[in-house]
Image: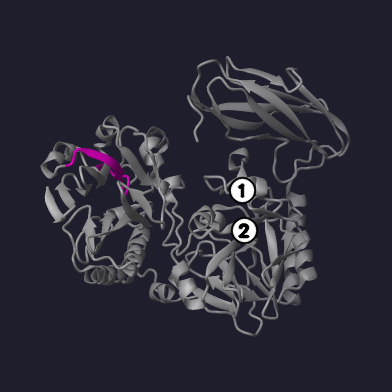
């Protein structure tokens, strides 16, 4: 046991385990093999109250079953919680054959361990009688954190495997989050830079010795990483982006060019700001996989926003649509900044109840909405008025956000259109000029069928642009652009052509399923229910005929399950007008004592005497105790 200071000690194990002593009690940073528990008496510690994990790797965590047996509270990074307590699922779901995912998520626990909770980020919190601050520091893993504490006149930063020695990291392989990328190297550079702004006096790594000159150690690391990136020919604009993440579209409307997707900031003279979309700020690149541990929102650019533009608070955030790259940081903004979430009334259910939906790109946790905004009505915020318009096309659950700023009508249209490539850090993005700047020659309509795209969507939304007549349109995945009537006419023509081609290509003369292919949908799509409880499910049924018809729906359930309609029948029947939709309800009862993950149920549909078979499925999980 080596003293770092009077009440901080290092124990060399499979990783450095740090002991923060407070009398006869202690908090540990990481845990290694657990051998630390056999040596605490050497420094007069009788009880460990908490273990704070910097990341999920086995060299940090393999001894945690000993901690559980000892009744010690275990706290883990929020993105990586599943890699501790739900690791069985991760091992079963992880692709192993034809695998292009190089993230070191297999360097994880072999068996699950229960955790007390997750480490709240950016805000001071008390552990073992001492205040500590957890800071996101992705790089070695996507979800890694560093932990800061002020003790004995010094600020100590426990940095996990972010940095191992001046200018060095413990692993470069761990920073390759995709098959051949450098995402984690960029994240390491960004994290180290952010850590330096927090003025640590000592860096305490998981592997390596304490560093008493953090600025020197981090500057050397930054220089070395930038050389590596330059050799790879990547991220040429990174220095520029770090200096100026925000570009003015107008004086009071800013473009966060580092975010994925792009985020926009409306500045008020009050010092408050309103954000449009906020997904992955200063995105170094996304990991190949899409499980929770592969996605990390953070508030990286907010300090620069406040410093450069005098922002005193992020008052409100509004999404153009529900996709994760537009909303990932909403809950974090709420926790740290007290930001209110406003959303168009057409997407509130999707944000608040993602488990009900069979949709792509859903965020993992519910996002509570503080204010549901009506469509096609002006809404006041500070000195501005915003109007949200329905914007089907990329997804049914989207809005165009209209606001007049500095004498310009700006329309935010999210991902309605797309440009390639989407690697924003490869080249500088320049601010728009006062002269109309045409969009790229190929205006690519970014429709996705599973997002509930309708074939007439782009024709109809082109009418919106001609009606609103924005001066500037801003997008989720390319730079803002000045627009004019000629551009709106081009969009209208492309919308008509897209609709025509769908009419030509789809065989819909007798049975018209639209562009979504199915006559039924089950809600909730992935419910979780406690053992012994019943489950209510609804089936939305669409009449695919241009005449009124009778529909019959039967729920298909696993053997031993009971099912009935809400009125107690075995089959649900309903009358539907031409092309009309309706809803029926069922009550499902799993067998007594059963626990199961993703049991499959389906809705078997007949309409007008025509059997369409099992048109929709849902995945039911039955747990021993309903999770919080």
Q: Quadrant of residue 601?
A: top right
**Proximity of marks 2 and 1: CB atoms separated by less than 8 Å:** yes
Which region shows up in magenta? 45-59
- Foreground residue, 284 or 378? 378
Above or below: residue 69 compared with residue 351: above
Residue hosting label 1: 351
Q: How much space separates mark 2 and mark 1, taking CA atoms? A: 10 Å
In the picture, the disc for residue 319 is: 2
Q: In the figure, is residue 261 to the left or right of 458?
A: left
Residue 207 is covered by the magenta coloring: no
> Whole-percent x and y of residue 119?
39, 48
> Whole-percent x and y of residue 12?
14, 47
- Foreground residue, 33 or 549? 33
Q: In the figure, is residue 20 to the left or right of 370?
A: left
In this rendering, does residue 126 appear at all?
yes
Residue 57 is covered by the magenta coloring: yes
First in residue order: circle 2 vs circle 1: 2
In this rendering, does residue 450 appear at all?
no
Q: Secondary structure beneath disc 1?
A: helix
Residue at screen point 63% across, 35% down: 524
């Amino acid at each position: 046991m080596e003293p770092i200071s009077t009440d901080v000690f290092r124990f060399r194990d499979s990783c450095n385990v740090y002991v923060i002593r407070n009398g006869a009690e202690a908090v540990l940073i990481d845990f290694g093999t657990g051998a630390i528990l056999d040596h605490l008496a050497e420094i007069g510690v009788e009880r460990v109250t908490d273990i704070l994990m910097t990341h999920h790797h086995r060299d940090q965590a393999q001894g945690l079953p000993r901690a559980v047996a000892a009744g010690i509270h275990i706290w883990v990074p929020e993105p990586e919680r599943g890699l501790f307590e739900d690791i069985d699922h991760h091992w079963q779901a992880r692709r192993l054959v034809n695998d292009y995912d190089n993230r070191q998520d297999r360097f994880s626990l072999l068996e699950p361990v229960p955790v007390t909770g997750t480490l709240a980020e950016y805000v001071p919190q008390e552990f073992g009688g001492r205040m500590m601050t957890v800071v996101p520091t992705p790089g070695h893993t996507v979800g890694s954190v560093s932990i800061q504490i002020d003790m004995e006149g010094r600020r100590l930063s426990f940095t996990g495997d972010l940095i191992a020695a001046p200018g060095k990291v413990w692993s470069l392989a761990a920073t390759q989050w995709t098959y051949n990328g450098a995402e984690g190297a960029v994240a390491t550079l960004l994290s180290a830079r952010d850590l330096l702004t927090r003025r640590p006096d000592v860096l305490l790594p998981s592997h390596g010795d304490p560093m008493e000159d953090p600025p020197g150690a981090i500057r050397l690391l930054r220089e070395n990483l930038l050389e590596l990136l330059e050799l790879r020919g990547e991220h040429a604009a990174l220095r520029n982006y770090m200096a100026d993440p925000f570009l003015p579209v107008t004086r009071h409307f800013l473009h966060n060019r580092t975010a994925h997707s792009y985020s926009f900031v409306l500045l008020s003279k009050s010092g408050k700001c309103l954000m449009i979309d906020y997904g992955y700020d200063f995105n170094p690149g996304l990991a190949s996989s899409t499980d929770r541990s592969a996605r990390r929102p953070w508030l990286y650019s907010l300090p620069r926003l406040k410093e450069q533009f005098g922002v005193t608070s992020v008052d409100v955030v509004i999404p153009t649509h529900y996709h994760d790259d537009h909303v990932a940081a909403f809950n974090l903004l709420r926790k740290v900044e007290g930001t209110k979430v406003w959303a168009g009334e057409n997407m509130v259910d999707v944000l608040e109840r993602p488990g009900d939906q069979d949709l792509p790109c859903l965020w993992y946790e519910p996002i509570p909405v503080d204010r549901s905004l009506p469509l096609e009505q002006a809404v006041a915020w500070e000195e501005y008025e915003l109007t949200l318009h329905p914007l089907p096309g990329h997804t049914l659950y989207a809005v165009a956000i209209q606001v007049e700023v500095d004498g310009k009508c700006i329309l935010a249209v999210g991902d309605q259109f797309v440009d390639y490539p989407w690697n924003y850090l490869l080249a500088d993005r320049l601010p728009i000029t006062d002269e109309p700047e045409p969009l790229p020659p190929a205006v690519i309509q970014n429709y996705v069928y599973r997002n509930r795209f309708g074939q007439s969507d782009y024709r109809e939304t082109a009418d919106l642009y001609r009606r609103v007549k924005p001066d500037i349109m801003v997008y989720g995945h390319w730079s803002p652009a000045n627009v004019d009537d000629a551009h709106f006419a081009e969009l209208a023509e492309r919308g008509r052509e897209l609709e025509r081609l769908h009419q030509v290509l789809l065989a819909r003369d007798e049975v018209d399923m639209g562009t979504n292919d199915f006559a039924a949908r089950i809600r909730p799509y992935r419910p979780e229910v406690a053992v012994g409880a019943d489950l209510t499910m609804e089936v939305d049924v669409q009449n695919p005929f241009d005449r009124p018809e009778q529909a019959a729906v039967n729920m298909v359930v696993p053997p031993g399950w009971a099912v009935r309609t809400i009125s107690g029948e075995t089959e649900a029947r309903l009358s539907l007008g031409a092309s009309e939709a309706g809803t029926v309800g069922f009550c499902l009862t799993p067998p007594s004592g059963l626990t199961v993950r993703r049991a499959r149920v389906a809705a078997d549909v007949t309409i007008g005497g025509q059997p369409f078979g099992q048109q929709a499925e849902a995945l039911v999980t039955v747990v021993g105790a309903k999770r919080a």
